[in-house]
């Protein structure tokens, strides 16, 4: 057997006088490279283990769809859907978060069989213009602006044909005032945008350089210090300013279930699909009810009260279709 792993001294070319030859790369470099590779592999293994552990606690809703159907058997399903990151991908320009025609048809198909609501941090009118389905219930501004449906409901148990709930109406003037102040204050930071969602505000920083994130947050807090009735929360590359009242997406879920005639009912099975930190309020309500399921849309493991998970909006669409 021919050995290719080494050469004899006679096979080596004679070294030029006055020059020293070393193997390339040097042993020290090889050692450092091996250590770096080992660290990378260790980190990858740790991430994989973390992901597997998380998936065991929050399995794919697609993979466990038969289990979900079994749990819902004989009960009235009510669908609650977030918009951004669930029905539409997260995009740099919030005004460009348009859902596909395929996703719209999937939502329409679900609404034909079950009462269905869109629950979003966006302004209710803006979400309606994205979705364009009049048979749905819409809860905008993190549930502080609820209305619907505007079309005839097909569901006999939906007692309230026309629903309207706006628990933060008294804050409208101050929200407009703070919106103007924030727009002026953040104008010097490229990429920062202020979105008026009627009963709350969103300061988007997805297009802001990372080194300026802290400065932007400081500016926002500086404005809010004069408005103690408003509070700041954080989402996915967004700062949310909301009235300091006990009302969130979880309250919106409870209100809609009551409006639909399912308050204190053991025969209802709410399903809530969302991707953001604000959706956790709804997941927690379902946990406390001991009914229905929450489904988190996320590619990475994160702390959640959801029971199941999905990777991205395309998987959410598949879940709605099947």
Image (cartoon, rainbow, N blue to C red):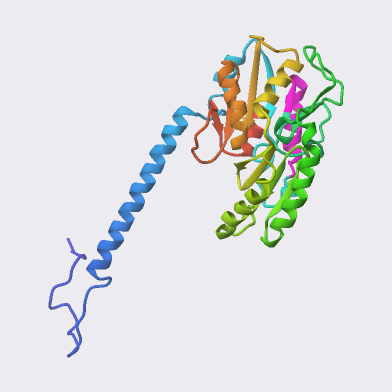
Tell me where residue 79 appears, x and y as whole percent.
69, 24
In the picture, measured across the screen, residue 252 lies left or right of residue 72, that is: right
| Predominant SS along the magenta part | helix
Tell me where residue 283 appears, x and y as whole percent.
59, 26
> For this rendering, which residue is in front, 39 or 225?
225
The residue most toward the right is 151
In the picture, measured across the screen, residue 298 lies left or right of residue 254, that is: left
Residue 319 occupies which quadrant of the picture? top right
Please tell me whether residue 102 belongs to the stretch shown in magenta.
Answer: yes
Locate the N terminus by quadrant. bottom left
Quick check: 66 above or below 190? above
At 73% from the left and 41% from the top, the residue drawn is: 99
In the picture, measured across the screen, residue 178 lies left or right of residue 279, that is: right
Please tell me whether residue 25 belongs to the stretch shown in magenta.
Answer: no
Tell me where residue 280 appears, x and y as whole percent.
58, 31
At 74% from the left and 52% from the top, the residue drawn is: 181
At 56% from the left and 15% from the top, the residue drawn is: 290
Locate the C terminus by quadrant. top right
> For this rendering, which residue is in front, 86 or 110?
86
The residue most toward the bottom is 17
Tell me where residue 81 appears, x and y as whole percent.
68, 30
At 76% from the left and 17% from the top, the residue drawn is: 259
Q: Which residues are magenta?
A: 98-117
Quick check: 68 above or below 188? above
């Amino acid at each position: 057997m021919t050995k290719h792993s080494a050469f004899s001294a006679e096979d080596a070319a004679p070294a030029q006088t006055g020059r020293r030859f070393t193997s390339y790369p040097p042993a020290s470099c090889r050692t450092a490279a091996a250590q770096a590779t080992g660290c990378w592999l260790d980190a990858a293994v740790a991430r994989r283990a973390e992901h597997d552990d998380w998936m065991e606690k929050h399995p794919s809703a697609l993979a466990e769809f038969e289990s979900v159907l079994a749990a819902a058997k004989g009960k009235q399903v009510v669908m609650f859907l977030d918009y951004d990151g669930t029905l539409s991908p997260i995009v740099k320009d919030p005004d460009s978060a348009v859902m596909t025609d395929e996703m719209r048809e999937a939502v329409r198909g679900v609404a034909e069989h079950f009462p269905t609501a869109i629950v979003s941090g966006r302004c209710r009118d803006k979400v309606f213009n994205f979705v364009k389905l009049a048979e749905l219930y819409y809860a905008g501004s993190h549930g502080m602006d609820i209305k619907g449906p505007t079309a005839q409901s097909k569901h006999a148990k939906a007692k309230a044909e026309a629903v309207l709930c706006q628990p933060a109406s008294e804050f409208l003037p101050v929200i407009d005032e703070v919106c103007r102040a924030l727009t002026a204050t953040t104008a010097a930071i490229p990429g920062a945008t202020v979105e008026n969602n009627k009963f709350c505000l969103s300061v988007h920083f997805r297009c802001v350089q990372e080194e300026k994130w802290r400065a932007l947050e400081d500016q926002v807090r500086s404005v809010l210090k004069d408005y103690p009735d408003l509070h700041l929360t954080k989402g996915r590359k967004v700062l949310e300013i909301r009235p300091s009242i006990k009302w969130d997406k979880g309250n919106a879920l409870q209100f809609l279930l009551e409006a639909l005639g399912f308050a204190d009912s053991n025969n209802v099975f709410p399903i809530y699909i969302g991707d953001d930190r604000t959706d956790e309020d709804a997941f927690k309500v379902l946990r406390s009810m001991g009914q229905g399921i929450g489904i988190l849309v996320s590619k990475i493991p994160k702390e959640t009260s959801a029971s199941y998970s999905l990777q991205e909006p395309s998987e959410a669409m598949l879940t709605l279709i099947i």
